[in-house]
Image (tube, grey):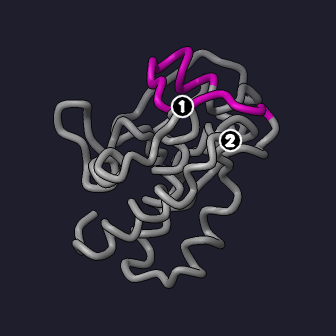
Amino acid sequence: MVTLTVNGRTHQLDIPPDMPLLYALRNHLELNGAKFGCGRGQCGACTVIVDGKAVFSCVTPAGALGERKIRTIESLGSAEHPGPLQQAFIDKQAAQCGYCIAGMIMRAHALLETNRQPSDEQIREHMAPNLCRCGTHMRIFAAIKAVIAKGEL
């Protein structure tokens, strides 16, 4: 039995402790925002926030998390009421195919929760582990800057 605290709710899951967190989220909790990309922690499509830090859920064993708090894209808003970062990504049309966007938003959110005024270099450095094959990096950057300018997260 593995206990996970996801988006403020505690869940008891009958899964092997070495199951990747991504599979627990998607297959057992039906939280499908985090995507399976590479399965090797190299693309970031699966990024979630664990205790305030961006984590690749495809290479994180669910049983290793203990009482740590996990946040997924579903915690930030909904299609009807997107959170400020989600709205900025929509406004700046930062998604092309959209596959990487949930991971991008979660990584950006982790940065802005700890640093409300990051420099351009800090944004670039923090976002570097997540890849966008469509090449919308400049729009993603503009969306993050828009949230910083508004001062809301």
Measuring from the top left, give residue 34's x and y in whole percent.
54, 33
Measuring from the top left, give residue 151's x and y in whole percent.
24, 74
Q: Which residue is mark 2?
A: 133
Q: Nearer the viewer, residue 82 or 59?
A: 82
Q: Nearer the viewer, residue 103 or 149?
A: 149
Q: Is residue 135 magenta?
A: no
- The Cα–Cα distance between marks 2 and 1, rounded to whole angstroms, is 9 Å
Q: Identify the image quadrant of residue 64.
A: top right
Q: Is residue 35 magenta?
A: yes
What residue is drawn where x is 25% and y is 49%? Answer: 83
What residue is drawn where x is 36% and y is 35%? Answer: 74
Mark nearer the N terminus (2 vs 1): 1
Q: Residues within 10 Å of mark 1 (few under 14, many from 20)?
A: few
Q: Is residue 104 left or right of residue 59?
A: left
Amino acid on which disc 1 is placed? Cys
Q: Is the residue 4 above or below the residue 110 in the image?
A: above
Q: Which residue is mark 1?
A: 97
The dominant secondary structure in magenta is loop
Q: Identify the image quadrant of residue 134.
A: top right
Q: Which residues are magenta?
A: 23-39
Q: Is the residue 124 above or below the residue 10 in the image?
A: below
Q: Quadrant of the C terminus?
A: bottom left
